[in-house]
Amino acid sequence: MPVDQALRKRAKQEGKSFNQTVVDALSTQIFGTTKSPEPRIEDLFGIGGDTLDDGFDQAIADLSKVDEKFWNDPGHTRY
């Protein structure tokens, strides 16, 4: 594999680990530099909750409901 060999050669020349050399090469291709931009909360979750699916609020609401069977039987002995 020519890419693998080239990356291993570069890692040895620069005195870096193979993994760091791969990360640096990818960062340069993606960001134009080996220094990636600071992560932002919007990058993870979007702006204004745009990335939450429509069922998220319902799923959270369902988790807040009290299951009377377990509420009345704290030891959970009756099923």
Image: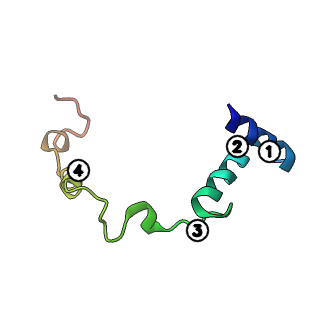
Label 1 packing within 10 angstroms: few (<14), some (14-19), many (20+): some
> Which amino acid does the dot numbered 2 rest on?
Asn
Mark nearest the camera among 3 and 1 is 1
Instruction: Examine the rendered structure and indicate whether residue 77 appears above or below residue 6.
Output: above
Depth check: give the residue in front, 47 or 57. Answer: 47
User: How far apart, in angstroms, are the residues tagged by discs 3 and 1?
Assistant: 25 Å
Locate residue 60 relative to residue 39 in the image: left or right: left
Secondary structure of the residue carrying tag 4 is helix
> Which amino acid does the dot numbered 1 rest on?
Ala
Mark nearest the camera among 2 and 3 is 2
Instruction: Examine the rendered structure and indicate whether residue 5 appears above or below residue 13.
Output: above
Of the 4 image quadrants, the one containing the N terminus is top right
Label 4 packing within 10 angstroms: few (<14), some (14-19), many (20+): few
User: How far apart, in angstroms, are the residues tagged by discs 3 and 4?
Assistant: 34 Å
The residue located at (17%, 49%) in the rendering is 66
The answer to the question of whether label 4 and label 2 lie on touching residues, with beta carbons closer than 8 A, is no
* Residue 60 locus on image (x, y percent): 24, 54
Of the 4 image quadrants, the one containing the C terminus is top left
The residue indicated by pointer 1 is: 11
User: How far apart, in angstroms, are the residues tagged by discs 4 and 2?
Assistant: 42 Å
Earlier-in-chain disc, 4 versus 2: 2
Earlier-in-chain disc, 3 versus 1: 1
Which label is found at residue 51? none
Instruction: Examine the rendered structure and indicate whether residue 76 appears above or below residue 7.
Output: above
The answer to the question of whether label 2 and label 3 lie on touching residues, with beta carbons closer than 8 A, is no
The residue indicated by pointer 4 is: 63
The residue indicated by pointer 2 is: 19
The residue located at (13%, 44%) in the rendering is 68
* Residue 61 locus on image (x, y percent): 19, 56
The residue located at (19%, 53%) in the rendering is 55
Mark nearest the camera among 3 and 4 is 3
